[in-house]
Image (cartoon, helix red, strand yellow):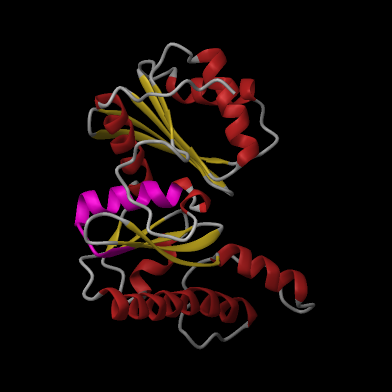
Amino acid sequence: MLLAIDVGNTNTVVGLYEDDRLCESWRLKTDPATTADEHHLAYRALLQSDWPDPTGIALCSTVPAVLRELRWMLARYYADLPTVIVEPGTRTGVRIVTDNPREVGADRIVNTLAAHDRHGGPCVVVDFGTSTNFDVVGPAGEFLGGALAPGIQISLDALAARAAQLRKVELQLPRSVIGRNTVESLQSGAIYGFAGQVDGIVSRIAAETGPLTAVIATGGLAELVVDQSSTITHHEADLTLHGLRLVFQRNQLAGGAVDPSP
């Protein structure tokens, strides 16, 4: 059983694979203050009742403080397991065609690998998280670059913090685009506004790359926008986990599992 861990700025998504089958997945809050021992207790609690112990671990993180503690966790509790941490130098099979490949987030590389494996290229991954990431995948599976925009929730939070008469609202589809009250107006601006942003950016990307094989939405807030976008073709919540599984397999075949010691 492979334990795949995708640490994002807001949430951590954990998946458990048996071969290529995703058996279960969980979404946890990402807390940079969580210690290595607390991480271990959380993962053990998820697995202990229904699932056997993992036989391998694949990990990517966009939060350095969490990555440091997870390294300690792996070294202390899972030192005997084959482990792959996606970072500069890790075998992914993804060629990074950007000015500074080392600054590209591990999650974007993993998403590129997963998207090309499932859909070929060129394609676009739209990852709805703390930020909204547009990852452009080339015909041969290379990472071409993309765009980064403020995420839906962080944008609403900033608006509520800076506008005296506005407040935080539940993110759900309003009755109509024309909001009849402040709550619905905020919901409309957020959901339809971000759907329009996606369609606009994807259309401009396609004008540069040529026809796209797919536009894949992923991330915790994707389901809010998918049905309102005219360019998104697939919604794949497990895309990053799938990419982590592929990276783990590549490194196992190449004998490239890493020493997780901090």
Q: Is residue 243 visible?
A: yes
Task: Check the image and report above or below for 44 versus 157.
Answer: above
Residue 204 against residue 119 in the figure, above or below: below
Furthest toward the front, the residue is 99
Instruction: Give the camera-side residue of 55 and 159.
Output: 55
The residue lying at 61 percent from left, 35 percent from top is 66
Range shown magenta:
107-124
Residue at the outermost right position: 164
Q: Main secondary structure of the magenta part?
A: helix
Give me the residue at 58% from left, 49% from top: 10
- Where in the figure is residue 98, as x and y percent of width and height? 43, 60
Q: Nearer the viewer, residue 146 or 172?
A: 146
Q: Look at the image and tell me in which quarter the C terminus lies.
A: top right
User: Quick one: quadrant of the N terminus?
Assistant: top left
Query: In the image, residue 130 lies at what x, y percent?
Result: 56, 57
Residue found at the far top of this picture? 80
Say which residue appears at 60% left-offset and 21% top-offset. Answer: 72
Q: Where is residue 190 in the image (x, y as percent from the top left)?
A: 54, 74
Horizontal side of 30 relative to 203 (left or right) equals right
Q: Is residue 109 magenta?
A: yes
- In this view, the residue in front, 176 or 138, is 138
Comparing 261 with 60, the one in front is 261
Q: Can residue 41 be seen in this view?
A: no
Q: Which residue is drawn at 49% across and 56% down?
A: 100
Q: Is residue 207 magenta?
A: no
Report the side of 23 relative to 174 (left or right). Answer: left
Image vertical order of residue 23 relative to residue 107, above or below? above
Q: Residue 188, how many percent across, how many down?
A: 52, 79
Image label count: 0
